[in-house]
Image: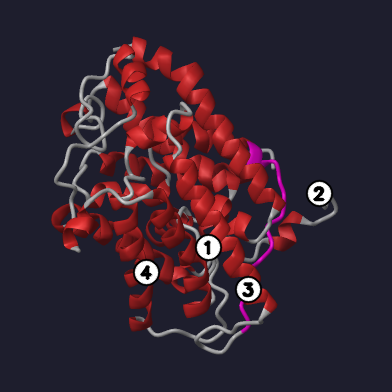
Amino acid sequence: MIQTNIDKTAVEEFVCDAHNNQVKKESFASNLKYLLVGTIFGIVFVKAEIISWFRIQEMFRLQSFHMYGVIGTAVMVGLISVQLIKRFNIKTLAGEMVSIPDKTFDKGQIYGGLIFGLGWAITGACPGPLFAQIGSGFLAISVTFMSAIAGTWLYGAFQSKLPH
Amino acid sequence: MIELIKQPWHWAIAGIMIGLTVPTLLLIGNKTFGISSSLRHICAACFPADIQYFRYNWKKELWNLFFVVGVLLGGIIASQFLSNPNEFIVNENTVKDLKALGLTDFSAMMPSDIFSVENIFTPKGLIFLVIGGLLVGFGTRYAGGCTSGHAIMGLSNLQLPSLIATISFMVGGFAMTHLIMPFIFKLF
């Protein structure tokens, strides 16, 4: 499972969790479709109260099924969709093969995951809800947002010194 | 219809819609779903500071920034036009636990005891906003993704590293809620 002999420096080409795998170039205006998908996504976040600090507390106190239901259903729907796309070789709008890069294990997923989990419980927000919380008028969250950018920057600055 | 939409949405509706974001993004443009990477693109675009990690063609990932601006817009639309006219409900056991920690306001989605603008420059603001935000930004990048990139996209694609990350998110959250938070609230 752990490929220890992978040369880390050679894999410096850009791979992140939300990668653009489209080969065909897109116009600036074509980005508007992602704006639209994001908007619907944001509405769901607010209407299902996923942006609520209390819902996250209920989740971590095992006092409500709500968040488990949301995440569990989302994973099931995502899983079935991805399997269908693969099985029937469904092409993208641009006619390309759908490609989803595999994730490689490193210890960052444990250390980073734990650190994010600590932050998730105090802020009541993962990165997605942060945007929707600010949009909903919780203006103090813009501080959390700027801090999250600073945290991202700090990771970038110290990446090579951290255990992975 | 609009009255129905204004009610809080059931978890199954939300789960289905969030889950459908995965194939939607794949099919409209071969994009893998993830949100925390937007924070990295913001750094790469605004403060690259010659750091290796921020030297890449972020313009190719512009779609991700459009997506998160959409999430912000969605927040505005939902709160301005679709807001729930009824009382916000928190589980009674959670209310009891949080009252014991000193919270008093349960009327909105975010407790004003903590997340109000007046608290920004207080020790509460320092912990819940500043330190909390730092942990979220640093942790998601270190883990290579957040709830969307790992828990939803990664698990949908049966990625073991994403399962490990998701379990770590949960362990971190439980530890904060049950072990650390009681001490944080004693500070105020």
Q: Separation of disc 2 and disc 1 at Cα?
A: 22 Å
Q: Where is residue B183 in the image (x, y as percent from the top left)?
A: 42, 12
Please give the chain letter of the residue carrying mark 2.
A
Tag 1, which secondary structure?
loop
Q: Separation of disc 2 and disc 3 at Cα?
A: 28 Å
Closer to the N terminus: mark 2 or mark 3? 2
Mark 4 closeness class: few <14, some 14–19, many ≥20 residues within 10 Å: some
- Marker disc for residue A37: 4
Q: State the residue position of label 2.
A: A2
Q: State the residue position of label 3.
A: A84
Q: Which amino acid does label 1 sit on?
A: Ala
Give the residue displayed 36% in from the left and 17% down from the top.
Answer: B97
Left or right of A154? Residue A76 is: right
- Residue A99 visible (yes or no): no
Tag 4, which secondary structure?
helix
Closer to the N terminus: mark 2 or mark 4? 2
Q: Is residue B96 above or below residue A31?
A: above
Tag 3, which secondary structure?
helix
**B43 or B108, which is in the foreground?**
B108
Q: State the residue position of label 1.
A: A18
Q: Which amino acid does label 2 sit on?
A: Ile
Q: Separation of disc 4 and disc 1 at Cα?
A: 15 Å
Q: Separation of disc 2 and disc 4 at Cα?
A: 35 Å
Magenta residue span: A97-110
Give the residue displayed 68% in from the left and 55% down from the top.
Answer: B159
Q: Residue furthest bottom?
A: A95
Closer to the N terminus: mark 1 or mark 3? 1
Labels 2, 4: front one: 4
- Marker disc for residue A32: none
Left or right of B181? Residue B167 is: right
Left or right of B50? Residue B4 is: left
Q: In which quarter of the image is residue B71?
A: bottom left
